[in-house]
Amino acid sequence: MAYIVAQPCITEAVWGSQTLQRLAMQLQYFNQLPRVNEEIEKDCCGIGSDFGLFNSVEVKNDQSSCVNWRGRRAAVLICLFEGPDGELRVILTKRSMKLSSHPGDVALPGGKVEEGDADDSATALREAKEEIGLEPNQVQVVATLETFISQHLLKVVPVVGLLARKGDFRPSLNIDEVDAIFDVPLEMFLEEDNHRCEEREWMGEKYNLHLFEFKSEQGVFLIWGLTASILIHAASVIYQRSPFFKGHLPDFQQLQRSLHHILA
């Protein structure tokens, strides 16, 4: 479910450019639309697609019992800013090779909820500050998107935030967690260029894994898995269109919802 965090009236002083102002208002309108996932989180007999392509997936696995999600919640920050050509760009990180889980993978700033976090937005902002030195007061949170499920059965909530003054952000990387920081155009997650699909299997069921290759002066980054799925969905919501690529199999999120009851 998407909801909008209460904010002051939308002005250039708060949101920056007209592009970001329009985006904030668009997400407020999006918040008023019916959410398929509101029912999904109560009953996953019919599942929603991250891209609106599938209505249901046949369940053949008997492990579709309820999962206890207490303590298994995280949030990530989709931090958007306006690029030099007026395009929306999103900040990504390359996880440290020192980490025990997913070393070297591309990720959105974020992590697990901690006891002192007021809500998902607080979690995402705290983690962004810890990982890349992004101060919470530099970001205006405008929405959260539908919950995603990781392969380790962690509920992940994407939090959308706007960075009005990119020039004021001075990255300070936590070298124990992050090896690099970079940004990419959000719209690339709807395009066929630099995208490919691989067929994978989980719990005896096949699904599509999305992978995107991004070349920059820092090198070549592979964006895949949960991060790719979240950004495909975010781009679909913001640009109000489906990706150009379509697969004959469900993606992991669709498969996950067919195998487990998603608890609120």
Image: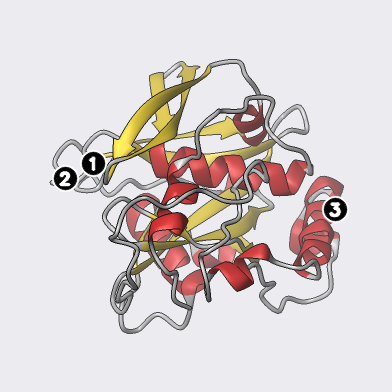
The residue that appears at 40% across and 80% down in the rendered structure is 117
Distance of label 1 from label 2 (alpha carbons): 7 Å
Give the number of the disc on residue 22.
3
- Three-letter code, disc 1: His
Q: Nearer the viewer, residue 48 or 227?
A: 48
Residue 26 x %, y %: 82, 57
First along the sequence among labels 1 and 3: 3
Write down the residue under mark 1: 102
Give the number of the disc on residue 216.
none
Viewer-side label of 1, 2: 1
The quadrant in which residue 242 appears is: top right
Compared with 137, 232 (above or below) is: above
The residue that appears at 25% across and 33% down in the rendered structure is 104
Q: Residues within 10 Å of mark 3 (few under 14, many from 20)?
A: few
The quadrant in which residue 14 appears is: bottom right
Color theme of the render: secondary structure
- Three-letter code, disc 3: Arg
Residue 111 x %, y %: 34, 60
Q: Are marks 1 and 2 in contact (CB under 8 Å)?
A: yes
First along the sequence among labels 2 and 3: 3
Q: Residues within 10 Å of mark 1 (few under 14, many from 20)?
A: few
Distance of label 2 from label 3 (alpha carbons): 38 Å
Quadrant containing the N terminus in the rendered view: bottom right
Viewer-side label of 1, 3: 1
Compared with 260, 41 (above or below) is: below
Q: Residues within 10 Å of mark 2 (few under 14, many from 20)?
A: few
